[in-house]
């Protein structure tokens, strides 16, 4: 046990806590030889970090991990949820307001989707909040071309398999009809890649707008488009069991 303490902390976990990326993505950065420790390229995620070590990602120094913070963000359509886009499209992180720490997303919204995203400076928390085991509902307001029948929407509660991919139960309700379009409210737990779009297209309805309203207990509410708001310490404690650090004496 003493040897483990002396070794320090694995670099993938350290970088995740520093908000660089999830541990899985950090391991990919290491494979791509983009991480340095003490000026030397890191070649294995089994590398250990100790207090005071100098760590760089893409030749930029990474600050020591700070207290865990969580933010609500109203993502506009037209931004990709990645730190870098090979096609050069604008990203969520290009549009962050000044003064924010380095953050990563909790899950993703695709290019044309909008609404609530959670951002955190702690990669371990990001991974924890993405796990289906949380049982957290993700709620959306969705506009489709056409008028789905309530019965075919109700059938989604049993789940559906499309091209050998199984999608779990989806709670879908018809809210209103506007000309050739309809607005739906959809809630699901797992949230596979492009799940809502694929399931509705399977039923014959093209999604023209998709807005996430809630992610578990966190709500979009009246947060303006493009705005970021920090989740306060009381909510972190009540919803996630995360305590704010104690203030030093004096």
Image (cartoon, helix red, strand yellow):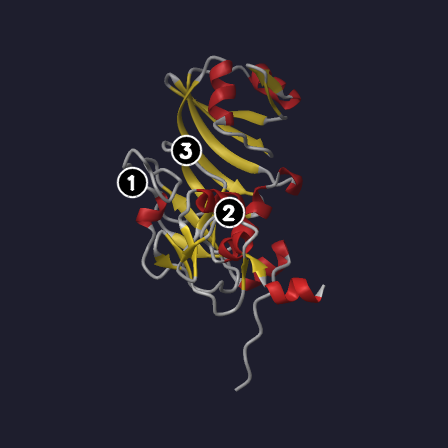
Examine the rendered structure and indicate whether residue 172 appears above or below residue 72: above
Which residue is painted at 53% across and 14% down in the image? 149
**Rendered residue at 34%/36% (across/down):** 77
Percent position of residue 217, x then y: 58, 47
Q: CA distance from mark 1 to mark 3?
A: 12 Å
Q: Which mark is residue 90?
A: 1
Question: Mark 1 packing: few (<14 Cα in 10 Å), some, or many (20+)?
Answer: some
Find residue 73 and report its horizontal and vertical position in percent: 42, 48
Specify the quadrant of the image occupied by residue 167: top right
Residue identified by numbered label 2: 22
Where residue 62 sits, quadrant-wise, is: bottom left
- What is the residue that sits farthest to the right in this orientation? 1
Asked if 189 appears above or below 98 in the picture, the reply is: above
Per the image, label 1 sits on a secondary structure element best described as loop
Query: For the residue carrying disc 3, how many other residues have a C-alpha within 10 Å: few (<14), some (14-19), or many (20+)?
Result: some
Q: Earlier in the sequence, mark 2 or mark 3?
A: 2
Q: Which quadrant holds residue 178?
A: top left
Q: Is residue 84 visible?
A: yes
Q: Which residue is mark 3?
A: 110
Viewer-closest of 236 and 211: 236
């Amino acid at each position: 046990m003493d040897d483990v303490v002396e070794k320090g902390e694995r670099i993938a976990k350290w970088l995740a806590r520093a908000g660089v990326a999830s541990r899985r993505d950090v391991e990919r950065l290491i494979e791509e030889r983009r991480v340095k420790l003490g000026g030397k390229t890191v070649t294995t995620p089994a590398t250990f970090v100790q207090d005071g070590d100098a760590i760089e990602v893409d030749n930029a120094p990474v600050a020591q991990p700070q207290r865990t913070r969580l933010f609500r963000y109203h993502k506009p359509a037209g931004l990709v949820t990645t730190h870098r886009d090979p096609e050069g499209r604008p990203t969520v992180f290009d549009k962050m307001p000044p003064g924010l720490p380095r953050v990563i997303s909790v899950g993703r919204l695709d290019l044309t989707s909008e609404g609530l995203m959670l951002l955190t400076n702690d990669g371990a928390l990001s991974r924890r909040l993405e796990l289906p085991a949380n049982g957290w509902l993700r709620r959306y307001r969705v506009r489709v071309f056409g008028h789905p029948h309530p019965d075919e929407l109700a059938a989604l509660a049993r789940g559906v398999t499309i091209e050998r991919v199984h999608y779990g139960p989806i709670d879908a309700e018809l809210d209103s009809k506007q000309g050739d379009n309809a607005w739906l409210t959809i809630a699901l737990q797992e949230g596979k890649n492009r799940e809502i779009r694929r399931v509705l297209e399977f039923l014959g309805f093209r999604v023209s707008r998709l807005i996430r309203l809630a992610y578990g207990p966190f709500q979009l509410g009246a947060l303006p488009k493009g705005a970021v708001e920090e989740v306060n310490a009381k909510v972190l404690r009540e919803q996630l069991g995360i305590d704010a650090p104690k203030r030093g004496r004096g």
